[in-house]
Image (cartoon, rainbow, N blue to C red):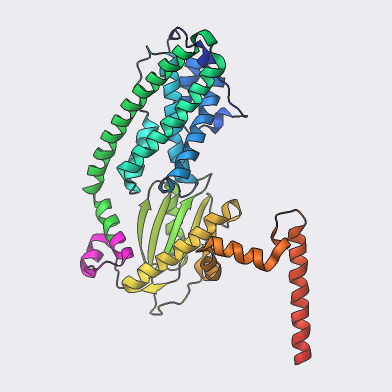
Amino acid sequence: MTQLPTAPGREWLLELRPRGPIALDSAASSSPRVAETIAHVGEEPVRCAIEVGHAMAVTITREIPVFGGGDGPFQMLRKGTESSTLRSLVLLAFPAAELQPITEEALEGDRDFVRRGIALDKVLRGIRLGHAGMAQAFLGACEDLVAGDRLADEMKAVSEDLFRYIDSFSDSMVVEFLAERDRWITSAAAARDETVRHVLSGDDIDVRAATSVLSYDLHRRHLALIAWVGRESEASDLGRVAAAELAACGATSTLMMPVGSSALWAWGVLPGSGPTATPSPAPVVRDTDVHVARGLPGRGVEGFRRSHQQAARAERLARLAGDRAARSTDYADVSAITLLAEDLPSARDFVARELGPLATRTSAMPTLRETLLRSRSVKHCAGSRARA
């Protein structure tokens, strides 16, 4: 790669440094993207851009929750915010560089937003929030690194360059979003997606026609599960893991529906006539970090819908547990807890009211709570024996 001359007065961009320790291998962007940027500006400014891109993704998911939903969607969003920060860094330092403002990582995220059903106005708001975070970072660094006699002019120029950048970036994102939406709407996957969502919403449907579209018999007995990727797994693992789980439960046919790039909804037809009998799955040995939440079996369209709702409640509970969550979560095992998790503020109030100081997060409290629980259990058993 031919080294381009830094724009006059923009040498300060090569002095950018992250606020905290940032490893280059923690980047969400592609390796070629990172290497390309390092070749232009060096490693430390790239570390700074990785840090800024992460902060932008955090802000966007906090302000627009629809972009959230676990580590997979967050990393997809972060690919776009980080790669865009890397690209803007190069374009600010080297205006002569013949680079498009949009990156392939950002376009990949754009297509994912369509498949997840995120509206265009939300995407555009996310872009505005990202631009605000990027501008704050670059202008703040400019204020720290540029001499006072030329600071005002430099901040004005950087601000104008960033507005031009984000304007072109937004145009490209809108064009790709609309093109992907057209492709998605006309695809067979979209027809299945739409049919499943109508069933789950309780809409009045023609069950025979829906069965034909899905190639899956809605009249039968179903078990639903939801699978999602962990930190060390790939989306390509989802279908394989879901199929293995359903096969272990005895499923004779399956329906798989990707939800974005990091989650999967799945159903399997189970043998037998009992509407709610719980299957006893054989242990599934996994070589990948995929999490699964299962509902209870149910018959017909209502059972299809109810089993999915139960799996979704179990999934929500597992996601709340974070890194402590087991690889598999069965609704049958956590149904009572999921009811509490439906209203977290009330659940927290209940715990604080019942436990008082024992609910505090100090190092000694877990031991005290365990001791109290054992003491109450012993007294309960002794009282039972006395009454007997």
In magenta segment, residue 198: yes
Pick whichever, 37 or 255, lies toward us.
37
Q: Is residue 26 visible?
A: yes
Pick whichever, 162 or 53, lies toward us.
162
The residue that appears at 53% across and 18% down in the rendered structure is 143
Q: Is residue 216 left or right of residue 325?
A: left
The quadrant in which residue 216 appears is bottom left
**Quarter of the image with the N terminus in it:** top left
Numbered circles on residues, count: 0
Pick whichever, 340 or 75, lies toward us.
340
Of all residues, the one furthest to the bottom in this rendering is: 388
Compared with residue 208, is residue 52 higher up or lower down, i.e. above or below?
above
Where is residue 235 drawn, in percent x and y? 43, 46
Q: Is residue 234 visible?
A: no
Where is residue 35 drawn, in percent x and y? 48, 22
Compared with residue 132, is residue 190 higher up or lower down, i.e. above or below?
below
Where is residue 267 drawn, in percent x and y? 38, 63
The residue that appears at 29% across and 38% down in the rendered structure is 177
Pick whichever, 387 or 258, lies toward us.
387
Q: Is residue 318 left or right of residue 362?
A: left
Q: Which residues are magenta?
A: 196-221
In magenta segment, residue 280: no
Compared with residue 283, is residue 17 higher up or lower down, i.e. above or below?
above
Where is residue 266 drawn, in percent x and y? 39, 60
Q: Is residue 286 left or right of residue 198?
A: right
**Quarter of the image with the C terminus in it:** bottom right
The residue that appears at 36% across and 37% down in the rendered structure is 108
Compared with residue 147, is residue 308 higher up or lower down, i.e. above or below?
below
